[in-house]
Image: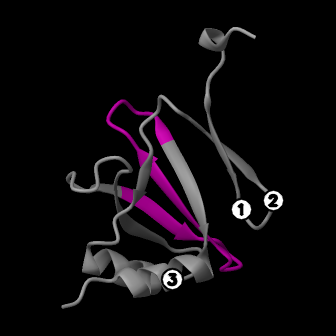
Amino acid sequence: MNTDQVTLGRTSRNLHGRYRMTPSHSLTYVINFRDNSNCVRIQNAQPGKEILVLVHPEQEPLADPLGAKGMRSQDGALFIVEITKADGTSQSFEWEYPLLKLVAQLLQPLR
């Protein structure tokens, strides 16, 4: 196999058995847990309601945050984040909501 013709990346699997592929050449975003109001919004997210979620590039934790759309699934089990990048492409990822809420509580900055 010629690797210059194959998109190399990493896969992950959530508790529902879904696989996601992130190409290694793409910029991956993660939730900004350093922002207190971001943590509070996530903890108070209601099923089916869209909220603002601040994210930053995974490899640049001190970069200016980027606003993204976050929504808790109708059954409340998942939290999906969708980022629209400057070039118009989008990226999304999901968390199991109970785990995300716990992480947001634990990493919430002290006031």
Left or right of 83 on screen, residue 23 = right
- Neighbourhood count class around disc 1 (C-alpha, 10 Å): few under 14, some 14–19, many 20 upward: few
Task: In the displayed orientation, state which residue is furthest to the bottom.
Answer: 111
Spatial separation of the CA atoms under disc 1 and disc 3: 16 Å
Q: Is residue 45 visible?
A: no
- Neighbourhood count class around disc 3 (C-alpha, 10 Å): few under 14, some 14–19, many 20 upward: many
- Neighbourhood count class around disc 2 (C-alpha, 10 Å): few under 14, some 14–19, many 20 upward: few
- Residue interval drawn in magenta: 68-90
Spatial separation of the CA atoms under disc 3 and disc 2: 21 Å
x and y percent of residue 82 in the render?
Answer: 49, 53
Looking at the rendering, which quadrant does residue 110 occupy? bottom left
> Disc 3 designates what residue?
101
x and y percent of residue 87 in the render?
Answer: 36, 30
x and y percent of residue 12 in the render?
Answer: 67, 51
Mark 1 or mark 3, which has the lower sequence index?
1
Mark 1 and 3 residues: CB-CB less than 8 Å, in contact? no
Element under disc 2 = loop
Q: Nearer the viewer, residue 92 or 111?
A: 111
Q: Amino acid at mark 1?
A: Asn
Q: Nearer the viewer, residue 94 or 87?
A: 94
Q: Is residue 61 visible?
A: yes
Mark 3 or mark 2, which has the lower sequence index?
2
Element under disc 1 = loop
> Disc 2 designates what residue?
17
> Disc 1 designates what residue?
14
x and y percent of residue 45 in the render?
Answer: 48, 81
